[in-house]
Each structure stands twice: as C-alpha cells, then as structure tokens.
C-alpha cells in the first residue's frame, strides 16, 4: 500500500491541523456548562464526515447530547462496517497538573513517542482515534477504493455512561444494520507490538452517603462519644476487601467465569514487564488479588475501587470538627458473567449491613454496564489481524482490557454483530489524567491500518459467502 503511505506523508500536516481544531473544542459531557461546545463539536464531526465524502450525514438529537450519524452505501450486496466512536471528553481537572493547556493541543516528544505526541484532552480518548477513521475513509473515497459500505455513529455521551445511546440503538435497528462494528477507543501493547482488544470489563458505579449526628460537632466536646461518619465510612470501605485482597461482598464472585489454565498460560506469554510497569507509575510494589498476576488482575478479574471520598474539613489549616456526613464514589469493574444490576444490589445489601446503628447509610447507583468478551475465530478478527500484520510487520496479540465501553455489549444484543476493537493508544497515554496524549506515530499508523481492515474484511466476507 505504497499509495496510502504517500497519501499520509503528503497530508500529514493537514491531518494534524484538522485534529487540532477538533481538540480545541472543550466537549466535556459531564459538565452542563459545555453544552454549546458539545453542539459545536457535533457540528464539526458532521462537517468533517461530509468533507471526507460521506453521502448522508445527520445529527440525531437525543434526550441528551446528539449522535452524529453518517452513511455511505455503495452496494447493498457488499458488507457494511459500522464505525463507533465518541466526541465527548472527560473533564480536564486537576488543571494545574497539565504541562500545557488541555484544549490547546501541542506536539511534544516523549520517551515512548520519540516522533512526538499530541498533548490535549481527548487526543487519545477518543477524538484522535475516531478521527483516524474519518481520514482513512476520506482516502478510500478519494481514491475510489472503498471496498464496502460504511456507517458512522459518533456519540457525545460516552464518558457519562451513554445514557441515551441504548434507546437510539433499539429504535434504529434497521438504520444501524451492519455486518461488523469497528471501534478505535482502546489501546495496544506497544508501538512495536500491536494487540486487538478481545474483552472489556463491565461496570457498576455508585455513591454512598454516611450520616451521623444532625450537625457538624466540636471534635473535643463530642470526640470519642459519637460515631464519626468519616471514621465509619473508612472502616466500612476497608471491610470490602479481605487480607487476600478479595472482595468480601457475599455472592460477588458467584458468576465470575474462571479463565482456564490454558488461556492463562497464553496470556502470560504476552510481552509485559513488571519492572517497567512499576517504574512508569513510581510504585515500589504491585498490589492485588492473591493468586493472580498483574495482567490478570486488570483484565480477567473483577475489582472494587473508591474513586473519590470526602467529608469534614478539607480546607487550609485545621478545624476541629466531626462532620455530620461522609461520602464516597465507588466503582466495581466486572467480568463475565457478572450482571451489573445484581452486583449493585449485592453491594447495597452488604454495605448497609456493615453500618453500625449509630449512623444511617444511603447507597445511590449511578451507571453500569455489562462486560464483553469476543472470540477470535471470526472474519472480523482475522481481517484486523491481517491489517496489523501488514502495517506493523508482526501479528497482533489478542488481549482483554480492563476498561469499559458498556455499549459494546448492547450492540451485540440489539444489532447481533460482533465488535472489533482496533485501538491505537498506549496505556501510558494518560487518558482521563492530566497530560493526556496520543502519538503522532499512532495517529498515522491508525489511518494506514484501517483501510487494510476494510479491504481484508470485504475479501473474507465475499469468500465466506461463496
Ligand atoms: N475509551 C475508554 C475505555 C477504554 C480505554 C477501554 C482503554 C479499554 C482501554 C472509555 O472512554 C471510558 O473511559 N470508559 C469508561 C466507562 C464509562 C461508562 C464512563 C471507563 O472505562 O471508566
Ligand atoms: Mn473512550
Ligand atoms: Mn474515556
């Protein structure tokens, strides 16, 4: 594909400039303040699809933020690839930890990205990654080599749990009909070793509130004589894991599918350096469930983590006070066949049972999602692997990820099609963190690999039909 490489070299600056313009719009879905920016981003995505040559593009309103839908049908007899991505981003805070402003993209060289990486919120998750698809599509249309039909669905609420996408998918089954779903919203092992994500963890996210006395109290007058909600909350949270770092919620592991020794042995062969892992995070030791490796702990095993905890006085200096209330946000990452609602219920019952009579506890569920695991014996996986093999010179390794994209489970349930997760980010790209970045190499490599997927998928699809 020398022609494609030429096209990328010639258009590299334009590809970067366009992505920079997209990254400059702060499309933060979690904060109502950015509503106008979200609308502007949806408009930007629509225009970019039109400019790339997509025949029909529309903005589909929902109860929340709009979904940009594009359709380019060349021949009903050919397969249809549905590309999914999200144009919304996580809030950038803490702002003071960014080395450059989050919505003012710059290219900086790093150890893992010697050719430079684009630093901006959303560069990797997911603007940079879905925009690779727009550019790959542009190339195929321009050169007249698009081998199949394409549909695009780029949403604006992924980072807040896609609350309206499920209904949209259910109501638009015909419109979204496809043979395979293609998503670039995950990562790969390294720039020398591509991998295809074959699993995503599910999620149960909730908030807890512990209430003690009816007002904040003087910690001298009352300290030691009443239950302090912050102390109690800390105790309750500590009780959620045992000394083997297993989760203590009764029934929590009942539906966990144990991965076979064979598959675990296979997983252990993937390149992974514990030393590099520790060094990258500045930690002296790893931590986690007894009996499992680090790789297993973040992929095939469930986890429970406090995402935020607050209560009492946290301002400057000291204030001697016993707070009336304490709070925490807790997430549980789930694996097959754990059911998010069941897990939420198990958590709630158990958490309430941990509370002493001296406090009251409220548990409020936020959002959830099912875990997803996909087999590799299908033409979608084979096509992706063949594409990677050609552009990276080595085959991809199948690997389950610890992150969640809850809609993937729903796609399979409602649209009956498999999702291929062709991610080009690295774990070290700091998604959701300050200084998120995306390698220029990764961005361009994505644009180069995607057209090969289309080509190989269509070939395999046609020969399977014969
Ligand atoms: N793109 C990520 C998920 C991801 C990243 C999966 C890397 C695998 C590898 C996505 O945007 C995300 O952040 N998902 C959320 C869940 C959502 C319900 C807010 C997550 O995993 O926390
Ligand atoms: Mn994402
Ligand atoms: Mn994300």
Image (cartoon, rainbow, N blue to C red):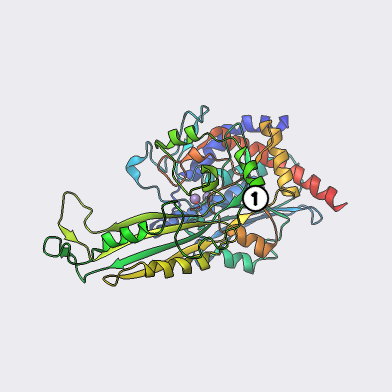
Picture coordinates of residue 90, whole percent (x, y): 44, 51
Q: Residues within 10 Å of mark 1 (few under 14, many from 20)?
A: few
Q: Is residue 214 left or right of residue 378?
A: left
Nearest the viewer among 427 and 281 is 281
Q: Is residue 322 left or right of residue 68?
A: left
Total numbered labels placed on residues in the image:
1
Picture coordinates of residue 184, whole percent (x, y): 60, 46
The answer to which image quadrant residue 258 occupies is bottom right
Q: Is residue 380 left or right of residue 312?
A: right
Nearest the viewer among 234 and 433 is 234
The answer to which image quadrant residue 359 occupies is bottom left
Residue 61 in view (yes/no):
no
Which residue is at a point 39% across and 54% down the rendered structure image?
307
Q: Secondary structure at mark 1?
A: loop
Residue under label 1, please give it.
Answer: 260
Q: Is residue 146 left or right of residue 118?
A: right
Which residue is at a point 41% across and 52% down the rendered structure image?
243
Quadrant placement of the N terminus: top right
Picture coordinates of residue 191, whole percent (x, y): 58, 33
The answer to which image quadrant residue 13 occupies is top right
Q: Give the vertical position of 6 relative to 63 (above or below).
A: above
Residue 225 in view (yes/no):
yes
Ligand 1 within 8 angstroms of badge 1 C-beta: no
Picture coordinates of residue 94, whole percent (x, y): 34, 46
Which residue is at a point 70% across and 65% down the rendered structure image?
174
Q: Residue furthest left?
A: 221
């Amino acid at each position: 594909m020398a022609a494609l490489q030429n096209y990328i070299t010639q258009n590299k600056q334009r590809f970067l400039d366009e992505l920079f313009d997209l990254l400059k719009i702060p499309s933060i879905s979690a904060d109502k303040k950015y509503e106008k920016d979200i609308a502007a981003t949806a408009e930007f995505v629509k225009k970019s699809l039109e400019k790339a040559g997509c025949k029909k593009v529309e903005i589909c309103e929902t109860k929340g933020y709009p979904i940009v839908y594009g359709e380019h049908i060349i021949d009903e007899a050919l397969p249809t690839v549905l590309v999914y991505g999200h144009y919304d981003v996580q809030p950038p805070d803490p702002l003071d930890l960014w080395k450059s402003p989050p919505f003012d993209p710059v290219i900086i060289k790093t150890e893992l990205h010697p050719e430079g990486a684009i630093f901006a919120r959303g560069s990797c998750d997911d603007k940079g990654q879905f925009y690779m698809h727009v550019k790959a599509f542009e190339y195929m249309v321009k050169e007249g080599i698009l081998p199949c039909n394409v549909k695009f669905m780029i949403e604006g609420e992924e980072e807040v749990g896609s609350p309206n996408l499920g209904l949209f998918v259910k109501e638009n089954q015909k419109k979204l009909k496809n043979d395979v779903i293609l998503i670039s919203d995950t990562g790969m092992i390294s720039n020398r070793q591509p991998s295809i994500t074959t699993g995503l963890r599910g999620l149960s996210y909730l908030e807890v509130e512990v209430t003690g006395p009816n007002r904040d109290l003087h910690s001298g007058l009352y300290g030691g004589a009443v239950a302090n909600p912050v102390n109690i909350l800390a105790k309750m949270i500590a009780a959620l894991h045992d000394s083997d770092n297993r989760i203590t919620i009764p029934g929590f592991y009942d539906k966990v599918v144990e991965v076979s020794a064979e598959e675990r042995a296979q997983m252990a062969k993937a390149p992974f350096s514990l030393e590099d892992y520790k060094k990258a995070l500045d930690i002296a030791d790893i931590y986690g469930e007894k009996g499992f490796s680090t790789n297993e702990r973040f992929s095939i095993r469930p986890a429970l983590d406090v995402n935020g905890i607050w209560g009492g006085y946290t301002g400057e200096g000291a204030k001697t006070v016993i707070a009336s209330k304490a709070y925490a946000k807790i997430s549980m990452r789930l694996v097959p066949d754990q059911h998010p609602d069941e897990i939420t219920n198990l958590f709630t019952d158990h958490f309430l049972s941990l509370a002493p009579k001296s406090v009251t506890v409220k548990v409020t569920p936020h959002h959830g999602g099912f875990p997803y695991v996909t087999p590799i014996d299908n033409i979608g996986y084979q096509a992706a692997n063949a594409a990677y093999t050609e552009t990276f010179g080595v085959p991809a390794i199948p690997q389950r990820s610890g992150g969640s994209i809850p809609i993937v489970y729903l796609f399979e349930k409602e649209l009956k099609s498999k999702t291929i997760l062709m991610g080009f980010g690295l774990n070290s790209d700091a998604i959701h963190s300050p200084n998120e970045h995306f390698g220029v190499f990764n961005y361009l490599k994505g644009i180069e690999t995607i057209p090969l997927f289309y080509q190989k998928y269509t070939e395999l699809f046609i020969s399977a039909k014969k």
